[in-house]
Image (cartoon, rainbow, N blue to C red):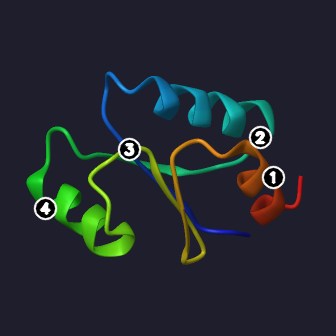
């Protein structure tokens, strides 16, 4: 099973779209809210080099933003 982590903020529309996409395809994920935790924000930037959300980590493959095609490819759906 793939390990999926999504770095989000509560007001991010693309984060909500990504989470809805995961739910639609029954994909389990761990959500990390970077708005309320500075250490998580630093972790996200270290992985992606980006301050923008969502940052999605699928087994070490980083996707910045909601790229449905890339997510489908990585998740094989």
Tell me the element at label 3: loop
**Residue 23 placement, left or right of 53:** right
Residue 67 percent coordinates (x, y): 65, 46
Residue 72 percent coordinates (x, y): 81, 52
What residue sits right under mark 1 in the picture?
A: 72
Q: Residue at x 20, y 56 (%)?
A: 41
**Residue 5 placement, left or right of 32:** right
Q: Residue at x 32, y 59 (%)?
A: 50
Tag of residue 26: 2
Q: Nearer the viewer, mark 3 or mark 4?
A: 3
Q: Residues within 10 Å of mark 4 (few under 14, many from 20)?
A: few
Who comes first in sequence, dot 2 or dot 1? 2
Q: Nearer the viewer, mark 1 or mark 4?
A: 1
Who comes first in sequence, dot 3 or dot 1? 3
Tell me the element at label 4: helix
Who comes first in sequence, dot 3 or dot 2? 2
Q: Nearer the viewer, mark 4 or mark 2?
A: 4
Report how far apart the C-alphas of labels 4 and 2 lie in the structure. 29 Å
Tag of residue 53: 3
């Amino acid at each position: 099973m793939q390990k999926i982590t999504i770095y989000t903020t509560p007001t991010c529309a693309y984060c909500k779209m990504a989470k809805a996409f995961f739910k639609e395809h029954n994909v389990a994920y761990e959500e990390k809210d970077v708005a309320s935790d500075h250490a998580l924000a630093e972790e996200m930037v270290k992985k992606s080099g980006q301050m923008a959300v969502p940052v999605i980590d699928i087994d070490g493959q980083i996707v910045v933003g909601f790229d449905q095609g890339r997510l489908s490819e990585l998740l094989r759906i």
